[in-house]
Image (cartoon, helix red, strand yellow):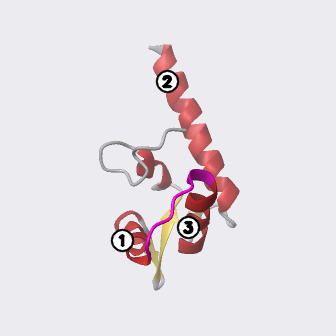
Amino acid sequence: MKRKTQKTKKSNNKINKLFFSYSTNKQYLTKKQIVRLMKKEFKLSYSKNVINSLMAIWGKKIGSSYYIIKDNFPKLFLKPDGFFRDISL
């Protein structure tokens, strides 16, 4: 039982570390930052329509723009519905 919790903590630490390395204010990721993260870390490239859908589905609207907040970022890696569900850290 301990091994599962340790593995979860390690993967959460990796996800949080990834988030903080690309976030400038440590609270959310902008569209530009999430695109940069995908290109540099995962070698992924998507069209503007897919990125807009990502931001609309998993992002939070602050003002007039959508942002991926720190609480929603780990959800992107969860199966079966996460955007990065096929990527393992």
Q: How packed is label 1: few (under 14 Cα within 10 Å), some, or many (20 or more)?
A: few
Task: Judge whether residue 10 is colored magenta.
Answer: no
Magenta: main secondary structure: loop
Distance CA(mark 1)–CA(mark 3) = 13 Å
Q: Which residue is mark 1?
A: 53
Q: How packed is label 2: few (under 14 Cα within 10 Å), some, or many (20 or more)?
A: few
Q: Secondary structure at mark 3?
A: helix
Q: At x 69% / y 66%, what residue is drawn?
A: 24
Q: Is residue 51 above or below residue 8?
A: below
Q: Look at the image and give the residue range highlighted in magenta.
A: 41-47
Distance CA(mark 2)–CA(mark 3) = 31 Å
Q: Which residue is mark 3?
A: 35
Q: Earlier in the sequence, mark 2 or mark 3?
A: 2
Q: Which residue is mark 2?
A: 5
Q: Position of residue 8 (x, y in %)?
A: 50, 30
Q: Is residue 9 above or below residue 62?
A: above
Q: Amino acid at mark 1?
A: Ser
In the depicted view, which residue is nearer to us: 61 or 46?
Answer: 46
Q: Amino acid at mark 2?
A: Thr
Most distant residue in the top direction? 1
Distance CA(mark 2)–CA(mark 1) = 32 Å
Q: Amino acid at mark 3?
A: Val
Q: Is residue 89 above or below residue 4?
A: below
Q: Earlier in the sequence, mark 1 or mark 3?
A: 3
Q: Secondary structure at mark 1?
A: helix
Q: Secondary structure at mark 2?
A: helix
